[in-house]
Image (cartoon, rainbow, N blue to C red):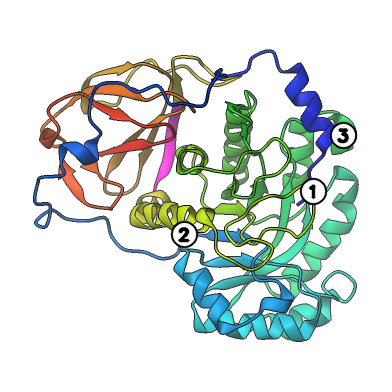
Amino acid sequence: MKRNFILLLVSLTLTNCIKDIEDVYTVKSIDVATIESLISSKDLNDYPSVKDTTGFPLMAWRGIPDEYISIERFQEVKASGINLMFYPYKSIENMQIVLDYAEQMDIKVLISCPGLITQTEMIVNLFKDHPANAGYFLQDEPSASHIPTLKKLAETIESIDNTRFAYINLLPNFFSPKDYAVGSYEEYIRKFITEIPLKMLSFDHYPVVSNYIRPSWYYNLAFIRDEAEKAGIPFWAFVLTSAHWSYPVPTIDHLRMQVYSNLAYGAKGIQYFTYWMPDRDPYISGPINNKGIKTNEYYLLQEINKEIHNLSYIFQTSKVTKVSHYGDIPQRTTQFTNAPYFVESIDIKGGDALLSEMENEDNSFFMIQNTNLHREIGIDIQTDNQTKIVLKNGIIIPASLIKEEFKLTPGDMVMFMR
């Protein structure tokens, strides 16, 4: 996935509204306990859990490279919590081996190999019946000038295999009209949606730069969500797992910040850039490094994927009905004014928060996320006696078990259910 370093530097230099900048990286603490600490002595065995499901897409961008293909490496991918993989394979033969191994591990793979672009019909016919085929990778971060070619490719694929999707990943909103090849970011996104038969909308925006959050990120999420909803298609978002340029080596706080904000806005797929660290400058880290060795980021990826899996039924089946922000309101987003009916009172202390309301056929959900990189926040909330809290391990407890103010660490969230 390419990155425009000049644009990144311009963004860093010209940004007038830098959020969360600190002289040091130390997290500012508040003197209350987390929910996990408050319930640590309680026996939760008799409480129900969220329904189990494995279908929420968690994609490894740059999965297993050609020279490392083996069943053991697929077992490693599976153990990380990844269930979807992409890598640009060097041969049709390797693509076939990858699909066969992936099927054994119940992992899906995007088709990307020689011939897909130049001999589309042949490649699609070759792999269209393979159980591990998730879809067809066409291009990353194209400008609008590529639309005629991509439209033709997507229509060809759809005419042969309409059970999957043609994958195109689009640019973030901090590039220039020259990069989009149209007058604005909004026009860029809308042209792809209206002119290509997209079945899902994918975009990348990595918000954690140095020690602040890009101020344009939440508007990007809000705009993508709105356009995907208008088109009647889901959207997928990215999480950065490989440090490069001014993007830092990720912590669990960074991963939660990105994952839960994406989910709060209604993302129906999470993509990790990258799983396997590229063997070139400027990359300095990745869950699997350029020597094929697991790093600390691998175990953080495993941890966050377990959390997503525990709650994936909620995120898969729910529709986001309202997203708002408390405290320092990000560019072109909505300020929080009132809580859902089952919340009797709420007081957020010490920093900023994102608040998302969701619902499925059975329940309403209210998610509160700490959107500060360097501050804990306190939550003092009272709900009616039918409200539950869904813990990150998937266990559902009565909200009445938490009778006092609690804190959220950076990026973390709490989920209420009614």
When asked about the image quadrant of residue 336, the answer is top left
Identified at 56% across, 83% down, the residue is 71
**Residue bearing mark 2:** 56
Disc nearer the start of the sequence (1/3) = 1
Q: Give whichever of discs 2 and 1 has the lower sequence position.
A: 1
- Is mark 3 in CB contact (under 8 Å) with mark 2? no
Q: Earlier in the sequence, mark 3 or mark 2?
A: 2
Q: Residue at x 73, y 78 (%)?
A: 67
Asked whether, in this view, residue 136 is left or right of residue 295, the answer is right
Residue depth check, mark 1 versus mark 3: number of the one nearer the observer: 1
Tell me which segment is drawn in magenta: 318-323
- Under mark 1, the amino acid is Lys
What is the C-alpha distance between the residues marked 2 and 1? 26 Å
**Numbered disc 3: secondary structure:** loop
What distance separates the C-alpha of mark 1 from that of mark 3? 19 Å
Quadrant showing the C terminus: top left
Q: Is residue 163 visible?
A: no
Q: Residue 246, can we see it?
A: yes
Mark 3: amino acid = Val
Q: Is 49 placed left or right of 349 in the picture?
A: left
Q: Main secondary structure of the magenta part?
A: strand
Q: Which residue is mark 1?
A: 2
Task: Report if the CB atoms under discs 2 and 1 are less than 8 Å apart.
Answer: no
254 or 387: nearer the viewer: 254
Across and down, in percent, residue 302 comes to 45, 58
Q: CA distance from mark 3 to mark 2?
A: 33 Å
Asked if residue 398 lies left or right of residue 370, the reply is left
Mark 1: few/some/many CA within 10 Å (<14, 14-19, 20+): few
Q: Is residue 64 above or below residue 145?
A: below
Instruction: List x then y, in percent, for residue 122.
Output: 82, 82
